[in-house]
Image: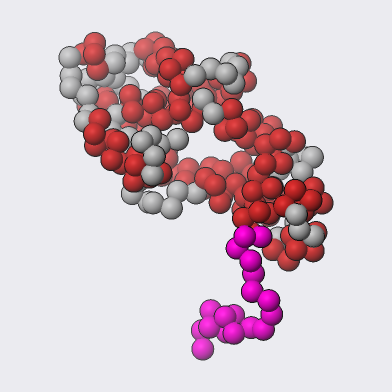
Amino acid sequence: MTGDARTSRLPGRPRSQEVDVAVLTAALDLLIERGAGETSIERVSQRAGVTRATVYRRFPDKTALLIQAIESVHRDHAPDALEWPDVERMLDDWAVYLSDSRNRRMLRRLYGAVDDYPELLRAYRGANGERRAAAEHAALRRSRERGHLPPDSDLAVLQEILNGSVLHHLGSYPDTEDAGAIKAYFTAILRQLGYRPPELTGTPDADHGEHAAVSAKATGKPRRS
């Protein structure tokens, strides 16, 4: 008999999926609103409308709870869905994501907690960080091949600069900026590194319809955030 089979036959009350969702949602909401230090099992249980014992039956401590809350929202369950055909599409999606004030606050909370709760940022990056980094590199490579970036561009360095620019924007720009202004910010940085948008090179851009199909597959929405 397998371990799974034995587990399925253990006596006891079945675990409620609704309670799981309520607890994880409450934990993530409190993390964003108050930060990791001010989030507690007591506050999560009150927000979720359950007892502390209910939370502790699912998670041994606050850190484990917050890690799963982060992963439950940010893990991409469609392994082949994360793809940008070029830099323009990548910046479009970055801009949409960063135009959401909730996303911005969450990122600031995670980076702000890196000394006391480093596991949280690792959880966020681990949810789909490796595939996201590979998708970024592929988008930059395609744009370089089309002549939108200098042929000698170091793509790894460009990724480091762009990711650093995200942190700068989170700390220096208001949360009220719209997606168009945010994309212009990233484009201006890339222009200083030799980037030439498709309209300046005369090189055909990647097919937008293909990107829309990929994005719809990833999220069920017209655009991926």
Please say whether residue 3 is one of the residues in the magenta stretch. yes
Number of callouts in the render? 0
Residue 177, percent from left and from top? 53, 17
Q: Is residue 62 visible?
A: no
At horizontal 66% and vertical 60% (from top left) the residue drawn is 19
Residue with the most extreme bottom position: 1
The foreground one among 97 and 117 is 97
Is 177 positioned to the left or the right of 93 in the image? right
Task: Name the colour scheme.
Answer: secondary structure
**Residues in magenta?**
1-19
Residue 105, percent from left and from top? 63, 30
Against 108, residue 130 (above or below) is below
Residue 28, percent from left and from top? 65, 44
Residue 109, percent from left and from top? 67, 34
Against 86, residue 186 (above or below) is above
Q: Is residue 170 visible?
A: yes
Is 17 positioned to the left or the right of 161 in the image? right
At horizontal 24% and vertical 11% (from top left) the residue drawn is 200
Is 222 positioned to the left or the right of 25 in the image? left
At horizontal 69% and vertical 80% (from top left) the residue drawn is 12
Q: Quadrant of the C terminus?
A: top left
Please say whether residue 105 is one of the residues in the magenta stretch. no
At horizontal 34% and vertical 39% (from top left) the residue drawn is 215
* Quadrant in the picture for residue 207: top left
Is 91 positioned to the left or the right of 164 in the image? left
* Quadrant in the picture for residue 146: top left
